[in-house]
């Protein structure tokens, strides 16, 4: 993932450097969009490094910032893809439903919880519980699914 973010950042920074016009003039105002030149000149004017070394540091800085934003861009693209694939913006429900499809009881409780339908559970000791599912088995990062079921009467 990190290499993918770095490659995407390199492409973005290079395309922005090549495709954006350098000066923008608007009613007598002149704005330079060459961020690399501006940062390089600032580093060189501070006396930290020579102009050539300052330009190298400038590209390192721009690539670092762009790599950080590329991760957010890839995360948003993945979320958008999942939303289009499942047909809903709430992608937690279909993804968790697929994970719980192996256990019929967990899947039934999960579907009842998200469709807000009442369930009736009969235990082996002849106790009957009727209510709406408030919380049920959802997979966690550490281990398997939680085994507790919470019913609201």
Image (cartoon, grey):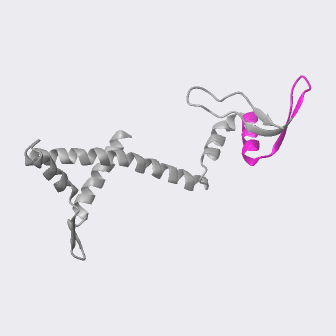
Q: Residue farthest to the bottom?
A: 27
In the rendered structure, does residue 111 fall within the stretch colored magenta? Answer: yes
**Can residue 7 be spotted in the picture?**
no
95 or 36, which is in the foreground? 36
Q: Residue farthest to the top?
A: 125
**Can residue 66 be spotted in the picture?**
yes
Picture coordinates of residue 2, whole percent (x, y): 35, 40
Picture coordinates of residue 9, whole percent (x, y): 31, 49
Q: Residue at x 56, y 26 (%)?
A: 142
Judged left or right of residue 80, residue 92 is right
In the rendered structure, does residue 120 fall within the stretch colored magenta? Answer: yes
116 or 74, which is in the foreground? 116
Q: Residue at x 8, y 48 (%)?
A: 51
Judged left or right of residue 78, residue 90 is right
Quadrant housing residue 6: top left
Count of labels in the image:
0
Q: Residue farthest to the right?
A: 126
Placement of the N terminus among the 4 image quadrants = top left
Judged left or right of residue 63, residue 112 is right
Placement of the C terminus among the 4 image quadrants = top right
Residue 30 versus residue 69 in the image, above or below? below
Quadrant housing residue 99: top right
Picture coordinates of residue 19, whole percent (x, y): 25, 64
Residue 95 versus residue 103 in the image, above or below? below
Q: Residue at x 12, y 45 (%)?
A: 46
Report the magenta residues as a range.
Answer: 104-129
Picture coordinates of residue 40, whole percent (x, y): 15, 50
Q: Residue at x 76, y 43 (%)?
A: 112
14 or 29, which is in the foreground? 29
Residue 111 versus residue 106 in the image, above or below? below
């Amino acid at each position: 993932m990190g290499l993918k973010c770095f490659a995407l950042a390199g492409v973005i920074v290079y395309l922005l450097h090549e495709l954006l016009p350098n000066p923008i003039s608007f009613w007598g105002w002149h704005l330079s969009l060459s961020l690399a030149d501006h940062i390089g000149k600032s580093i060189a004017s501070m006396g930290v490094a020579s102009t050539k070394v300052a330009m190298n540091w400038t590209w390192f800085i721009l690539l670092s910032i762009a790599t950080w934003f590329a991760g957010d861009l890839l995360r948003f693209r993945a979320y958008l893809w999942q939303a289009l694939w499942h047909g809903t913006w709430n992608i937690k429900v279909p993804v968790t439903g697929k994970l719980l499809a192996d256990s019929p009881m967990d899947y039934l409780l999960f579907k009842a919880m998200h469709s807000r339908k009442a369930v009736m559970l009969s235990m082996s000791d002849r106790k009957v519980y009727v209510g709406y599912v408030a919380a049920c088995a959802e997979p966690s990062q550490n281990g398997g699914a939680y085994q507790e079921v919470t019913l609201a009467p």
